[in-house]
Every structure is written in C-alpha cells, then in structure tokens.
Image (tube, rainbow, N blue to C red):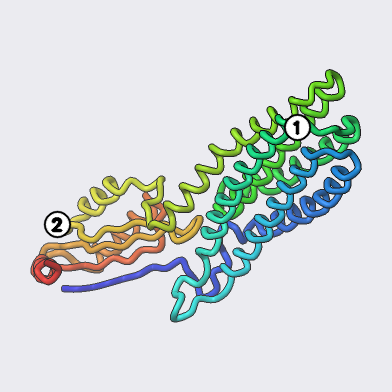
C-alpha cells in the first residue's frame, strides 16, 4: 500500500504573501522617507550638524531597505517555473537578511561616528537642528504606523519597520542632543547619545537576523511543536509509526510539512490521509502538506535501502 497526497497553498502566481498585502503602505513609507531624507541633507549642510547628516545617511539606508522590500514583493508575485517550483516567494526572506546585515553595519558606523564626535565635537546650529530633527521624528512615526501591521506578518516588512524604528531613535537622539546643546552648551551629548542609539538598534536587528537565517536553514516554525505534531499523527487510528517528518517555513505566512505515515494492514489509506490533513490544518495551521502512506513491509524495505 502506497499513497501520496499534497495540498499546496502555492498557486501558479503566489501573490498572496504576507508582504504583498502591505505593499501600498510600504510604498507610502518609502515616499515619505525619501522626501524627508533630501530635506535632512539640506538641513545638515545648513546647520553644519554631523548628527543630522548621519541621520540622513540612516534614512538613505531606510529608503534602500524599503525599496529592496518592494522589489522582493514584486519578485514574489512572479509565477513559479519548473526550475523554481515555489516561484520567488523566498526573495522576501533574502531581503530581510540583507536589511539585518545593513542595520548591523550601520550600527558599527554609528559607534565610529560617536567616537569621532567625542574626540572632536562639531560646531552646530542648535535651534535649526532641533527643528529638522522634530520634523524627521514626525515622518518616522507616520512611517512606523504605516508598517506596524505588516511587521507582524512578514519578515520583509519587519525589516523595513526596524529600519524606520532605528531612524526614529536617531531622530530622538538628535532632538535630545540639540536640546542639551542649546540649553547647556555640552557638545559631548551628541556622541554619547549616538552610541546609545546604536545599542538600542542591535537587539532588534539580531532577532530579525536570527529569524531570517532560521527560515533559510529550514528550521521548524517557532509556533509548531513537532513532538506534539508527531503524537497527533500517531493518535490517528491505524497509524503505527511516523517517519521522515519535516516542518519548515517557505516564507512568512507559508509553512510546510511532509512525512510518511506507517499504517497497519487494516487501515484505510484515504481515511488516514483525510484525518492527517485535517489535524495539520485545524490544529497546527499547516495547509501545505505532503503525506505518504506506507505499510510496515514497504517502510522496512525503504529503511533497508537507506542503510
């Protein structure tokens, strides 16, 4: 007895990824960030503020990350081919990985700049610097609002959200530094706050990096208990063993499962398959499954061949 079934959630044109559902908000956030980045560069040149110029570079990274995220969404909507049977849906995971690496490199740059400013505090115009930083904070908050919902569903959008969050922290730092300089004249506030911003960015970026690598390494989705899943399959009447069980994430919102169920001679393969699919979908949210039914003799023969 040997029967195989597959219920796939990957259509010929996989346009339903989590990131694609938030494409419009991502586009708006990109437009806002790009427009204000130009304003911040002008403000930095006007005030002589290295902090503002660094924040503009941070916004440039944000814009690049969001553009990369949108590019990944477009690629994920391309139809699958015989060479790429899942299409390009994993482009968003690669995009998230790239965003995380860029954020870590940016953090290193922030530490370097903080050290340079500590050694040589720059002369800046505090009041204009404060005004530009306040406007930047408003833009960042709007962008974060646009991306908040998508960041809970898609690694791709989460990467863009964290970049905007990092820039928001940068704007807060510039605001604080400008305020301190205006009222106290203490220029070392700028490098010290800059280093603090870098420390706040690292933990969030590290989480994003680990999630992206976990998916690329075919790791088990964190919300799926594989031991419980195996026990659930073994509890199906007629199932005597579970072999070659794998659960992995293809892209955000699309998890897959495959495995072999060994059944006794009296089991009805169709009923076992139906019960297994229902358990995977209803209890574990796994609608893209590949389950093979084997009898004990076939399982033993295959086991001998694999030795």
Q: On the image, which quarter does residue 216 sit in?
A: bottom left
Q: Nearer the viewer, mark 1 or mark 2?
A: 1
Where is 219 relative to 293, above or below? above
Name the quarter where the C terminus is drawn.
bottom left
SS for dot 2: strand
Q: Marks 1 and 2, Cα distance to the nearest angstrom?
A: 73 Å
Q: Nearer the viewer, residue 148 or 123?
A: 123
Label 2 packing within 10 angstroms: few (<14), some (14-19), many (20+): some
Q: Residue 239 at what x, y percent from top left? A: 17, 58
Q: Residue 295 at what x, y percent from top left? A: 13, 67
Q: Residue 302 at what x, y percent from top left? A: 14, 70
Q: Residue 287 at what x, y percent from top left? A: 41, 60
Q: Which residue is mark 2?
A: 240
Where is 215 relative to 288, above or below? above
Q: Are marks 1 and 2 in contact (CB under 8 Å)?
A: no
**Residue occupying image coordinates x 77% and y 33%:** 174
């Amino acid at each position: 007895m040997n029967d195989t079934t597959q219920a796939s959630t990957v259509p010929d044109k996989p346009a339903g990824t989590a990131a694609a559902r938030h494409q419009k908000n991502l586009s708006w956030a990109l437009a806002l960030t790009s427009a204000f980045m130009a304003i911040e560069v002008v403000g930095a040149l006007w005030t002589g503020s290295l902090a503002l110029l660094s924040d503009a570079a941070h916004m440039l990274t944000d814009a690049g990350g969001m553009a990369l995220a949108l590019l990944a969404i477009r690629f994920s909507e391309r139809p699958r081919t015989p060479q790429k049977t899942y299409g390009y849906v994993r482009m968003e995971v690669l995009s998230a990985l790239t965003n995380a690496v860029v954020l870590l490199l940016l953090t290193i740059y922030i530490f370097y700049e903080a050290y340079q400013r500590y050694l040589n505090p720059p002369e800046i115009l505090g009041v204009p610097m404060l005004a530009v930083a306040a406007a930047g904070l408003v833009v960042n908050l709007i962008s974060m609002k646009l991306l908040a919902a998508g960041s809970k569903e898609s690694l791709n959008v989460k990467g863009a959200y964290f970049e905007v969050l990092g820039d928001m922290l940068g704007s807060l730092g510039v605001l604080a530094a400008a305020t301190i300089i205006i009222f106290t004249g203490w220029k070392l506030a700028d490098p010290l706050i800059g280093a603090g911003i870098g420390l706040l960015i690292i933990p969030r970026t590290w989480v994003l990096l680990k999630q992206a690598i976990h998916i690329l390494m075919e790791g088990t989705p964190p919300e799926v208990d594989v031991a419980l899943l195996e026990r659930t399959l073994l509890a199906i009447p007629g199932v005597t063993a579970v072999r070659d069980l794998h659960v992995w994430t293809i892209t955000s919102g699309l998890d897959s499962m495959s495995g072999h169920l060994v059944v006794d001679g009296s089991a009805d393969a169709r009923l076992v398959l139906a019960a297994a699919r229902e358990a995977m979908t209803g209890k574990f949210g796994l609608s893209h499954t590949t389950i093979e039914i084997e009898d004990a003799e076939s399982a033993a023969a295959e086991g001998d061949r694999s030795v």
